[in-house]
């Protein structure tokens, strides 16, 4: 919600609650805003002849917020202010206040012009001002390859890396004595003489200005900006927080009818509820995942058991197959030997039968036939040969029976 919307919503809320509506005080009128900005950063001395730090008063803050004029923010004014601001605001604290006031401007054109001026001034004061850029944030974001979640995150990581290198360099370098001031003025030399703690402060202010600038340009939405600024606030948290101080601070804001604080607290309350709901969903999903993992683990164990049993059965079957195959091969060898032996026996039988028929049967029969076919048959000779044949058959017939 913008400052203008809050200023409109508060009287409407009071009227709805039956409370008397407070009329808004007219905006303070006076010096041009360009003159106010010049005076914020101009060099002035205190009683010790030291340069006073730049500050933005509450009155000037209100004038800037309510101002409507948009002209005069040219390069000449920026160069003049930068020259003074390098001495009066090296940590960019006052510039950050100006950027916040600019962001609260009700006029869009003035708000954009003032923020552009703040970015130009920051670009002329930060540690890498030698690059002579008018928009350090744009130059940094040109290197964004989309690896970070948001431009704000990329900007913070990039600036933090640059400043970390500078801080390490300052810590490792010997102390530098500031140059003597002209006359009795104790001059400052800008960011070259900043301590590591002051460089951290300058980095924080740059991050705040960059966050406001990206919000104004529409490169980050309000929710992202809130998270970003909340992270910056976390770094400012006290080491010894006091609940009493927090309670008194809330009481002061209530007395001042500060509705933005209530909106802020409500925003974080809603975010906390959303986070709690999201956490419960994640817890439920985690429990479901754990149950599913347990079920799958049990299923996997059962599969492993069955696989082991099947592997054992396969091994037994393979062993049985191997045994049967060995037995089969032995049987084949036996059958082959038997066939070979049978062939040998058959040959012997054939040879024996052949010899029996030819030598012991056929020849005696032929001689017997020849003796009987003579004019005077010799029956005695034929009978003798037939007897010899019969004896041979009777003698050899036993061999065939074995």
Image (tube, rainbow, N blue to C red):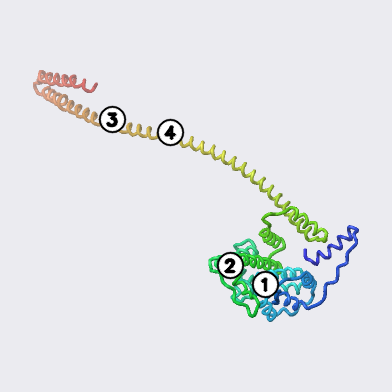
Which element carries disc 1, helix, strand or loop? loop
Q: Nearer the viewer, mark 1 or mark 2?
A: 1
Residue 184 position, x and y percent, is 65, 78
The CA span between labels 2 and 3 is 97 Å
Residue 388 position, x and y percent, is 13, 20
Task: Depth check: give the residue in front, 8 or 206.
Answer: 206
Q: Residues within 10 Å of mark 3 (few under 14, many from 20)?
A: few
The CA span between labels 1 and 3 is 116 Å
First in sequence: mark 3 vs mark 4? 4
Q: Residue at x 78, y 56 (%)?
A: 248
Which element carries disc 3, helix, strand or loop? helix
Residue tagged 1 = 89
Residue tagged 2 = 162
Which element carries disc 4, helix, strand or loop? helix
First in sequence: mark 1 vs mark 2? 1
Q: Nearer the viewer, mark 1 or mark 3?
A: 1
Q: Residue at x 16, y 26 (%)?
A: 362
């Amino acid at each position: 919600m913008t400052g203008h919307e809050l200023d409109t919503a508060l009287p409407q809320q009071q009227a709805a609650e039956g409370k008397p509506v407070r009329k808004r005080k007219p905006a303070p009128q006076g010096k041009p805003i360009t003159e106010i900005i010049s005076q914020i950063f101009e060099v002035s001395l205190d009683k010790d002849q030291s340069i006073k730090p730049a500050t933005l008063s509450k009155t000037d803050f209100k004038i800037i917020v309510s101002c409507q004029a948009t002209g005069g923010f040219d390069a000449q004014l920026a160069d003049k202010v930068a020259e003074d601001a390098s001495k009066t605001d090296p940590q960019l604290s006052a510039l950050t206040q100006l950027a916040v006031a600019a962001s609260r401007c009700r006029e869009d054109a003035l708000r954009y012009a003032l923020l552009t001026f703040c970015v130009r001034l920051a670009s002329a004061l930060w540690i890498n001002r030698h690059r002579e850029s008018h928009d350090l944030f744009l130059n940094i974001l040109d290197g964004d390859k989309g690896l970070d979640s948001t431009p704000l995150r990329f900007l913070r990581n990039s600036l933090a890396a640059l400043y970390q290198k500078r801080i390490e360099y300052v810590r490792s370098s010997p102390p530098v004595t500031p140059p003597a001031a002209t006359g009795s003025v104790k001059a400052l030399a800008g960011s070259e003489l900043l301590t590591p703690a002051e460089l951290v402060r300058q980095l924080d202010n740059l991050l705040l200005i960059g966050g406001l600038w990206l919000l104004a340009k529409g490169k980050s939405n309000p929710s992202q900006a809130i998270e970003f600024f909340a992270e910056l606030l976390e770094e400012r948290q006290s080491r010894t927080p006091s609940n009493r101080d927090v309670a008194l601070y809330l009481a002061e804001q209530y007395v001042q009818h500060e509705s933005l604080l209530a909106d802020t607290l409500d925003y974080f309350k809603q975010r906390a509820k959303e986070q709690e709901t999201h956490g419960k969903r994640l817890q439920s999903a985690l429990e479901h995942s754990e149950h599913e993992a347990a079920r799958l683990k049990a299923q996997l164990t059962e599969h492993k058991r069955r696989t082991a049993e099947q592997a054992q059965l396969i091994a037994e079957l393979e062993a049985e197959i191997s045994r049967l195959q060995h037995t089969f091969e032995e049987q084949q060898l036996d059958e082959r030997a038997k066939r070979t032996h049978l062939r040998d026996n058959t040959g012997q039988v054939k040879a024996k039968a052949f010899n029996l028929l030819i030598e012991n049967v056929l020849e005696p029969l032929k001689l017997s036939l020849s003796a009987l076919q003579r004019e005077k048959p010799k029956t005695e000779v034929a009978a003798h040969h037939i007897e010899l044949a019969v004896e041979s058959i009777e003698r050899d017939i036993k061999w065939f029976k074995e």
